[in-house]
Amino acid sequence: MELPVDVLVHNELLGVKGTRGRLLQHTEGYYEINLLFGERTHRVLLPVAQTVLIVAEAEDVGSQGIEIER
């Protein structure tokens, strides 16, 4: 995955669920993300262990679909 990338952020510490952000980098157990609070964008460091990131742009897997090995 190339950075920066738009993501959806879930983090209980901040009380955000599916908030849009921009992942700038990943360093030493933290994500560095730009998040919109009110009308201003703030750069935040969120711990990897307590944060879920979902890439905002869905992957195109084509007509073959995803093959799951069981």
Image (cartoon, grey):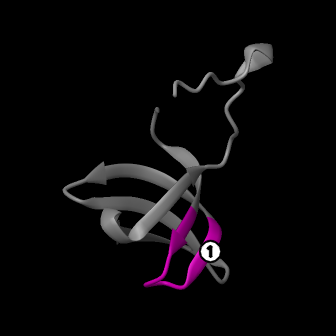
> Looking at the image, can residue 27 be seen?
yes
Give the prevailing secondary structure in the magenta stretch.
strand
Residue 46, image x and y in percent? 36, 69
Q: Amino acid at mark 1?
A: Lys
Residue drawn 70% across the image and 22% down it: 61
The answer to which image quadrant residue 45 occupies is bottom left
Q: Which residue is mark 1?
A: 17
Residue 12 magenta: yes
Residue 1, image x and y in percent? 46, 33
Q: Is residue 17 above or below residue 62?
A: below
Residue 60, image x and y in percent? 72, 26
Q: Is residue 22 above or below residue 2?
A: below
Residue 68 magenta: no
> Looking at the image, can residue 44 be seen?
no
Residue 49, image x and y in percent? 32, 66
Residue drawn 66% across the image and 48% down it: 56
Disc 1 on helix, strand or loop? strand
Magenta-highlighted residues:
9-19
